[in-house]
Image (tube, helix red, strand yellow):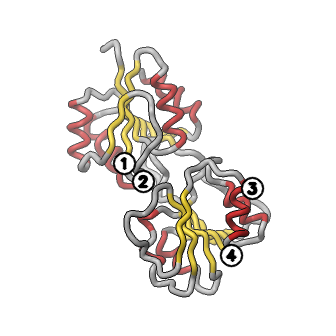
Amino acid sequence: MRDVRRILLLGGTDDSRALAEWLAGTAGIEVISSLAGRTEQPLALPGSLRIGGFGGVEALVRYLDAERIDLLVDATHPFAARISANAEAACRQSGTPRLVVQREAWKPVAGDRWIRVPDAKAAAESLSGLAKRVFLTVGRQELAPFEPLRDIWFLVRMIDPPRQALPLVRSQVVLGRGPFEESGERRLFQDHGIEALVTKNSGGPATYAKVAVARQLGLPVVMVDRPPGLAGETAETLEQARTWITRHL
């Protein structure tokens, strides 16, 4: 067994950042964080960093072998279905132990007016007659289904400025990177006359404030459910993830 164990950390979330910091500070571990590259200026991470996709399952299998990866930790966004599916298949083929770190999903509480839908297309369809001014926080790659809704004005939140015009007739972009606080979210809702929120069930505290504010204002929330989970070991907390990693070293 080698003195240094190599861990490939598929990241892009606050949890992955916290794990990278812990791993980089742990003796005998070398961490390689991998980001999809959708954010133009990602925050600095400890350890090694690679940006961009792997090129499919077989390419990831080759990467795991070439880089002598001992463990793979998938701490991607809950909606990053493709990379998670590729990681599951690659680890199964290569025999690499794999952990999925997925924070607990948000759950509706008293006062919430959730409309639960399976995807962005269903979210767009649910807006007919619901609201005229909508806060849209589903990511820039999920905007196309909302293009036909020409009678709705959208406030679209992004991390990076869009490189080209949005596929929305009536919209405004607001830039921001979580975590967000309720006071700021409330001002955003009120300043723009927001009547409904469309978001993905990302879970975690960093972006929950908008959901809480919608509840306080009595506004409907179109909540896109997470895709079905894949087989394999999972952790909902950083403590559980650390325990799993330590056990497999």
Up the image or down, 220 lies above or below 95; here it is: below
Residue 186's spot in the image, x, y percent? 73, 62
Task: Tell me the number on the disc at residue 112.
Answer: none
- Rounded to the nearest angstrom, the CA distance separating label 3 from label 1 is 31 Å
The answer to whether residue 98 shows anywhere in this view is: no
Please state which amino acid type lies under the numbered disc 1: Ala
Please state which amino acid type lies under the numbered disc 3: Ser
Contact flag, marks 3 and 2 (Cβ < 8 Å): no
Observer-side mark, 3 or 1, equals 3
**Upstream in the sequence, badge 3 or badge 1?**
1
Contact flag, marks 3 and 1 (Cβ < 8 Å): no
**Upstream in the sequence, badge 4 or badge 1?**
1
Q: Which residue corresponds to the image point at 57% horizontal and 79% vertical from the top-left?
A: 153
Q: Is residue 109 left or right of residue 16?
A: right
Observer-side mark, 3 or 4, equals 3
Q: Which residue is label 2 attached to?
A: 80
Contact flag, marks 1 and 2 (Cβ < 8 Å): yes
Q: Which residue is label 3 attached to?
A: 183
- Which type of secondary structure does the marked residue at label 2 adopt? loop
Q: Which residue corresponds to the image point at 44% horizontal and 64% vertical from the top-left?
A: 140
- Which type of secondary structure does the marked residue at label 4 adopt? loop
Please state which amino acid type lies under the numbered disc 2: Ala
Task: Tell me the number on the disc at residue 36.
Answer: 1
Please state which amino acid type lies under the numbered disc 4: Glu
Up the image or down, 213 lies above or below 231; here it is: below
- Which type of secondary structure does the marked residue at label 3 adopt? helix
- Which type of secondary structure does the marked residue at label 1 adopt? loop
Observer-side mark, 1 or 2, equals 1
